[in-house]
Amino acid sequence: MKLRKFLKTVPMKLYLILLAVVLFSFFSNDFGLVDIQKTAIILAAGIDKTEEGFSLTSQIAVPKGSDRAQGGTSSVNITTQGETVSDCVTALFGKTGWVPKLVFCDLIVLGEEAAKEDVISYLNYFLRNEYMPDNCLLAVCEGTAEKLITSTSAIDDASSLAIEKLFSDAAEKSGKVMTNTLKDFAIDYYDVGKSSYLPYVKMSPQKGASPGGDSGGSGSAGGSGSGGSGGSESEEQIYTAEETALFAEGKMVGKLPAEQTLALSLLEGNVFAGTFPAKEQGKPVTLTVVRNSGGVSLDMKGAPTAKLTVDVTCRLCCRGTTAPIEDISSDAVSPEILEDAKKVLQGYIEGLWNTCKETKCDVLELKRKLYRSSLKKYEEWEEFLLTSVRPDISADVKSMK
Amino acid sequence: MNKISERQIYFFLACIAPVGKLIVMPARLAGYCGNDLWLPALFQFAVQALAVFCVLLLAKRKESLYGLLSDGVGKFVAKIVVLLVGAFLLFAGILPLLEQKLFVQGVFYDTLPSLLSFAPFFLFLAYLCSKPLASYGRVFDLLAPIAIVGLAGVLLFSVGNADYGAILPVGASGARGLLKGTAYSFAWFYDSALLLMMLGKFDYKKGMAWKGAVCYLAGGAAVVFFLVVFYGIFGGTAVNQFFAFTKTSKYFSGFTVLGRVDYLFIFLLSLAAAFYTALPVSGAIESIIQAFGQKKYLPTLLSVLFSAGYFLLTYLLDFRFGDVMRAIAEQAFYLFPAFALLLPPLLLLIRRRKHETA
């Protein structure tokens, strides 16, 4: 009786709050703990084309001992083959007994040969996978992805973590790298322009490092797994991604060198604290971008014209010559440097334009702009826009005052 | 008997009803008519608002649906119509139920969990539906701020990542795409039918009809804006993005520092969606009660029966969501406007027999 009396005094609100708490904890899936001994937490995946289909190199995080002297991330690299990427993932489970878990996969690297085919033919696996983050970084690499993923980094325990450092926000703002994600790449692919870009990763041996030397942390558990990764680099490597691979209809059609990568970044208005060179009286100086705006617009009145505009405010960062202290204390840039900087940037943008035209890659999104502004004109110009449009390049460089 | 207040009805229309349209509908609309996905939704909200207006006008007669019908067309026909509405609600409730199931399995688990993981939902369903429909009033009071905060939070983290130009050019999908989008989205718009079952559970207040319609339009405006943001974020890949409200916010750049705090808002919306999923079942039970009279254990019995039936259905249709959705939304779509759009104005035409003879 007492209990019933008590229950009657408890307001309905409390029941509902209790219900909400129960539902919250149920939906949060804290009960579904991950058994790390049975799970392959894939940090990065590398995809290469083989004669039979594909090869997938997975970098898998593994639990480490509790030795506090050894920090960092341990990983093993396993390479599996199959006719589709899904077959490769299944083979990973078959060969190791680990259940592959892609939820922490932050990087997918495409081998150069694989990138020359329509990449959606294998990336569709990741797009279909509800348990894979679609904002994971996407990149192309020189040579095979397997070689890159299984290489020993000079700066981190796991190569994937070292490569991801190249794609940080700071790196992107420097204008030295154009990053892209699986989601944005897919959006571009399925858009009218069918063009996109990915950072192009290269690796080179770290000068002065001893082959097979300690990587500064705990060292990678590394090496190949049951699939046999072969070609694992014992020499410590450093990575760069200053070049940008261009894609049209899902296939890699060309590369932008570092200067044109910077030009693309400037056109997108992304750059802050990035640097570029100029000359004063034939001597080198480096300018830092402190403000950048840019854009591409399409003028369809008369002959189609693409207006490529870059506005940069910069300060003097460094001279390649000795300078008096008064000069060092000043950020101002002389008119001569500004004029040269303008020419430099115009040259970069011209180079970018020419590369895009040669490769028929609409990375400047001209088709998208026309489609969105006028469906009728888009249908009229769809086939010829990229070949007939003329550039109108304008670079304005100002000095910080 | 407890009554649902005027405020609680507005809360349902403005805050709870929109939540059911944020899970699978955005991706399906993107599939049917691409960047024009917001246009069919706008149309649906507009016509539903008219139907809601009609239902709220019916509330002036202070009768339940059965009472209204029996006065006008006789008890036998009234029974049939009310039971048909109940059957329709049970049928309409299948889609949100399966959406809810897939949503929980797809979003809150990182690998496909077993069906049993979703089983506790049916206990919740059985409990909630055993309560009188009028008890939803308090639920609406509690859920309204939860839904508002949930949607506002999700939108807050999403609006900055959208490319709003993606919805251009307007009308790109053509008349065929727009018609398809409109016809096949009826399956998510039957709030006026839910409201029909609440007739007699609330009293009409002055101006309630237009205020209710405006509330519904306000909720609709939030959904339409969400659809624009959704397409702005995913563009041509939007068709692949089921569980829309859990997807748009995750690209917020601050999460690298904050962590996925957007999950708090997603949980809030999930909570509101769970109650919304139960409403058709409660409506169906109410229809049987109206037709056969209130019996002591009838609501509990029906609630357990329907929840068990739904559980069985989810078990049988575990991997056939696509087929079910096509069957409900694409093949049987005409049922929805018949009950949710045509019935309310038709009911307005019914006059009491007594009045006619007098």
Image (tube, rainbow, N blue to C red):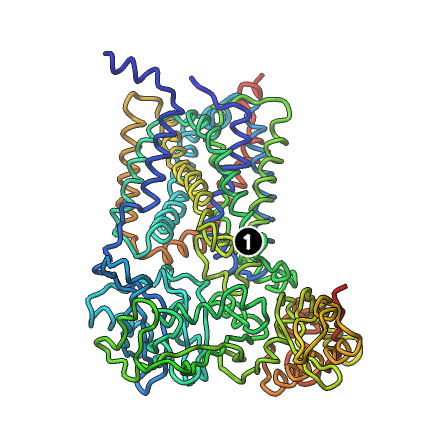
Q: Is residue B126 left or right of residue A163?
A: left
Residue at horizontal 27 percent and vertical 43 percent from the top = B119
Q: In this view, does A242 lie above or below B180?
A: below
Res B36 → quadrant: bottom right
Whole-percent x, y for residue B222 in the image: 58, 44
Whole-percent x, y for residue B223 in the image: 55, 46
Q: Is mark 1 on a helix, strand or loop?
A: helix
Q: Nearer the viewer, residue A21 or B308?
A: A21
Res A299 → quadrant: bottom right
* Residue A233 seen by the camera: no
Residue at horizontal 47 percent and vertical 30 percent from the top = B140
* Residue B259 seen by the camera: yes
Q: Which of A249 and A395 is in front in this view?
A: A395
Q: In this view, does B14 lie to the left or right of A339?
A: left
Residue projecting furthest to the front: A324
Q: Is residue A337 above or below residue B255?
A: below
Pointer 1: what residue? B182
Q: How many marks?
A: 1
As shown in the figure, which amino acid type bears the numbered disc 1?
Thr
Residue at horizontal 28 percent and vertical 40 percent from the top = B120
Q: In this view, does B284 lie above or below A386?
A: above
Q: Which of B180 and B224 is in front in this view?
A: B224
Chain of the residue that carries numbered disc 1 in the rendered image? B
Whole-percent x, y for residue B310 in the image: 30, 43
Q: In this view, does A108 lie to the left or right of A251?
A: left
Q: Which of A300 and A221 is in front in this view?
A: A221
